[in-house]
Image (tube, rainbow, N blue to C red):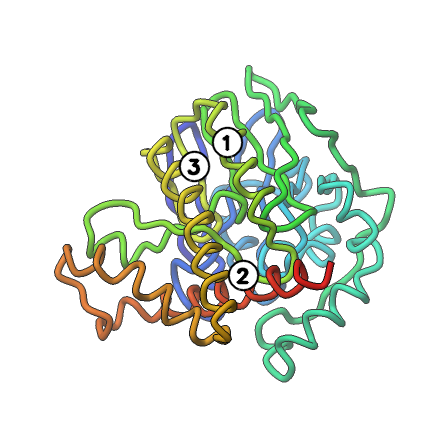
Amino acid sequence: MSIVELNAGIKQIDVYYQGLPENMCVYLVPGEKTALVETGPEPGLGHVLEALETLHIEPAQVDYIILTHIHLDHAGGVGRLAGLLPRAKVLVHPRGLRHLSEPSRLVAGARAVYADRFDGLFGQVLPVPPERLYAPEDGERLDLGAGRTFTFYHSPGHARHHLIVYDSVSEGIFAGDALGLRLPDVSRLTGYDFTLPATTPSEFDPAAAEATFDRASRLNARYIYFAHFGRADNVPEILARNRDLVTAMTLVGRRVLGSGGSAHDLEESLWEMFLPELLLSGVDRGHPALRHLGAELELNAQGIVYYLQREGKN
């Protein structure tokens, strides 16, 4: 178990997604009303429960489970965790409600992608009782007491069922995947927060993503709390960078597919985009810390190709 004490009372809890450190985290915000942002997948819930025990927070003291979106690496454990946290209301984007109360379609879709890896990654995906679910409207506020307010913003681009959460005390955004990814291993090598957008299948929409980055920039936040992974404080630069990368990566995708290339060809082109930046920090493609980046570029290429192929059919 790993708990990192951040600013404004926020605790970062590593759930060791895929058995790896610094791959997925959830955020605990204790107070007059206590909120848990994300659950992670079901196999990682032991880390969450151990953290609550270590922090002397009883299960009945957790008031809210807040999901930025329903992808199983973020929300797969919510059904089981809701059963263990008896008072917690589960907040999710309106498009996610039915998938949490009846997750069979969500599970079927993920099983089609992950096949025999599904059980190890995601375990058992249980439904959440409908009476425990609530969908905040765009711009809705949640009063957590002691002057702390969460504001919810619907934030498509990565997924249509995504929301981000602005915290009035930390002046930070719990970003899920809507504002991209932060890679800690690469960040340590470069000496700055190394980020990239999450353009993964199957709902990536570049125009919506660009609009979400623009909207987030108007919040003038001091921090971004990434689910993958950790806190960053150079917010304007990150938002501008990731927005520009969405645009550039999509344009590269159009060029690659227009010339008859494949998702693998696009993945190689994305490597070509990032390698000059990495080489400036003395990091070449063979460095073991770049394996995670390689996995993300593969997924991002697949998402861009899926979007462009879907666009071509319309």
Q: Secondary structure at mark 3?
A: strand
Please state which amino acid type lies under the numbered disc 2. Answer: Ile
Q: Residue at x 67, y 22 (%)?
A: 141
Question: Horizontally, is 53 left or right of 287 in the view?
Answer: right
Q: Which residue is mark 3?
A: 224
Label 2: how many residues lie within 10 Å, few (<14), some (14-19) or many (20+)?
Answer: many
Q: CA distance from mark 1 to mark 3?
A: 14 Å
Q: Which residue is mark 2?
A: 304
CA gap, disc 3 to disc 2?
24 Å
| Position of residue 152 measured from the top left corner of the image (x, y, whole percent) | 64, 30
**As displayed, is residue 156 above or below residue 7?**
below
Residue 271, compared with residue 211, is above or below; it is below
**Proximity of marks 2 and 1: CB atoms separated by less than 8 Å:** no
Which one is earlier in the sequence, the residue at label 1 or at label 3? 1
* Furthest residue toward top: 147
Q: Is residue 122 visible?
A: yes
Name the residue rendered at 39%, 62% in the picture: 21
Amino acid identity at mark 3: Ile
How far apart marks 2 and 1 lie (CA) works out to 20 Å
- Helix, strand or loop at disc 2? helix
- Tell me the tag on residue 214: 1
The answer to whether 28 is drawn above or below residue 221 in the figure is below
Q: Residue at x 44, y 45 (%)?
A: 12
* Residue 232, x across and y down, in percent: 35, 39
Nearer-N-terminus badge (2/1): 1
Check the image and report above or below for 62 versus 72: above
Element type at mark 1: helix
Q: Earlier in the sequence, mark 3 or mark 2?
A: 3
